[in-house]
Image (cartoon, rainbow, N blue to C red):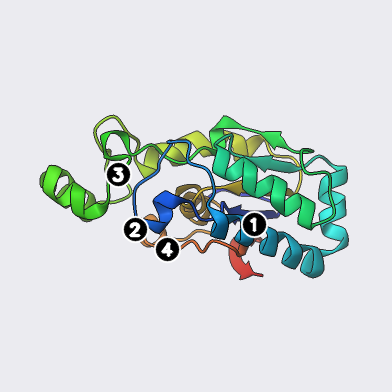
Amino acid sequence: MLDFPHRVVFVRHGETAYNAENRLQGQRDIPLNARGRDQARAVGGALRILLGHEIDELDEARAFFASPLERARETMEIARDAMGLAPKRYRLDPVLKELSFGVWEGLTWSEIEVKDPKGLRARREDRWAFVPEGGESYAMLAERLRPWLSRLNEHAFVISHGGVARVLMALIAGVPPAKAVSAPIIQGRAIVFENGSFRWIG
């Protein structure tokens, strides 16, 4: 767990066709579907009501950050518009990309069960450390995120991915890694990380 003095308002991107089909996206660049766009609009409107002037302070500090994958960028721009902010006034950072699932990307879990049962068993034994062929583990994603968090010198608003949220739960909020990797990360709501803990809002 890091000694992290700032607040991060985190939103997972809205739903995509891959989410609806329960397919692993990883770093594939999949756009939002209609429901995902509705989720982005709803969470932006809710955060404008719940956080008010804090949203304006983050915007003034240019402290909005997104993964460069299309589903995160689209979520950010729709959410910012719903907040009454200029849609494209935010920063992209590749460190906020989802963890890569390598050769598993594009597959459903039932397809993986057929194609790579040994790998799936290994993942079930240690989800934090498991690395799919050509991909990343949660532990590797944590090492990717640590320097970014250490450089962050202000409160921030982040739109990224489910895997990133789970790693932030471990790094910022001290959730045991074995528990963090199984945490449901809900689309259309926000997580606030601060004071060594997290809470859902919206």
Identity of the residue drawn at 43% across and 36% down: 27
Q: Is residue 138 left or right of residue 151?
A: left
Amino acid type, callout 4: Ala
Identity of the residue drawn at 44% across and 51% down: 17
Amino acid type, callout 1: Ala
Q: Is residue 98 above or below residue 12?
A: above
The residue beneath circle 1 is 40
The residue beneath circle 2 is 178
Identity of the residue drawn at 70% across and 50% down: 78
The residue beneath circle 4 is 183
The residue beneath circle 3 is 129
Q: Nearer the viewer, mark 1 or mark 2?
A: 1
Residue 25 visible: yes
In front of the other: 168 or 103: 103
Q: Is residue 72 left or right of residue 115?
A: right
Q: Residues within 10 Å of mark 2 (few under 14, many from 20)?
A: some
Sequence-wise, the earlier of marks 1 and 3 is 1
- Quadrant assignment for the C terminus: bottom right
Percent x, y for residue 73? Answer: 63, 41
Distance Cα–Cα, label 2 vs label 3: 10 Å
